[in-house]
Image (cartoon, rainbow, N blue to C red):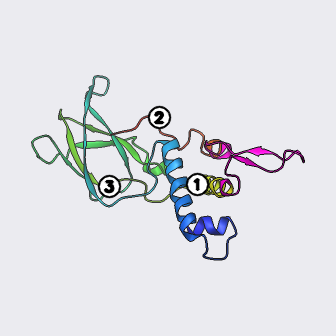
Amino acid sequence: MSELKSYLRIDDNLDDTLLAVWATTASRAVDGFCHRQFGSVTAEEREYTTQYDRHLGCYIGFIDDVMDVDDLVVLDADANEVTDYSLLPVNALKKGKPYERIAVNVSGPLLITAPWGWTSVPVPVKNAALLQGARLSARRDSPFGVAGSPTEGSELRLLATLDPDLKTSLGSKYRRERWAA
């Protein structure tokens, strides 16, 4: 909220409740557009299914984004710990991206405990959330979705969509084409 408040150049505390709502709404809109969770959560157990990939010769499971793998625990369907696994894409962390898949040699569902999400939010993602938060703020003064003056030729429609600059700035670099769970 403090970043959005600064971005909008607001110095008082009168609208802090609304700013918190706008910041959360904008962040979830960016998460939804990118099909990712850019924040992080404490370690929790999640279940994933796997499918055999004949080209790789192992089972692949699409998992939620994970970057912090120090405390990652993988269990098979019988609650046996799986230690022989690979996280994919291979160079994800070197590129500042999360792991999205797991390769294992056991079939069936996997129970994976990890601190899910990103270790830090990328700057373009923060900027996109600020743009969307500013758009939500502007809607407050244009409840019917129209800002400006049609008589002066400055009419602007604020439709119930994401800010076009948000889509442009994030492009396909941060957008995930497939949800894990």
Residue shown at 57% from the left, 57% from the top: 126
User: How many angstroms separate mark 2 from mark 3 (CA)?
Assistant: 22 Å
Q: Residue at x 26, y 55 (%)?
A: 44
Would you name the residue on which mark 2 appears? 177
Q: Is residue 162 magenta?
A: yes
SS type, badge 1: helix
> Residue 29 versus residue 49: which sits nearer the camera?
29
User: Magenta-highlighted stretch: main secondary structure?
Assistant: loop
Q: Residues within 10 Å of mark 3 (few under 14, many from 20)?
A: few
Return the disc, 1 or 2, that comes first in the chain's sequence: 1
Q: Which residues are magenta?
A: 139-166
Q: Is residue 51 visible?
A: yes
Query: How much space separates mark 3 and mark 1, taking CA atoms?
Result: 26 Å
As drawn, the label of residue 140 is none
Residue type at numbered disc 3: Val
Q: Is residue 153 above or below residue 3?
A: above
Q: Position of residue 22 (x, y in %)?
A: 56, 59
Residue 23 drawn in magenta: no
Q: Which residue is mark 3?
A: 69
Query: For the residues carrying marks 2 and 3, which lies nearer the camera in this image?
Result: 2
* Kind of residue indicated by mark 1: Ala
Label 3 or label 1, whichever comes before in sequence order:
3
Q: Secondary structure at mark 3?
A: loop
- Pick out the residue farthest to the top: 54
Query: In terms of image quadrants, where is residue 60?
Result: top left
Can see residue 72? no
Question: Does residue 115 lie above or below 145 as drawn?
Answer: below
Which residue was labeled with disc 1?
Answer: 129
Q: Position of residue 93 (x, y in %)?
A: 43, 51
Question: Foreground mark, 1 or 2?
Answer: 1
Local SS, label 2: loop
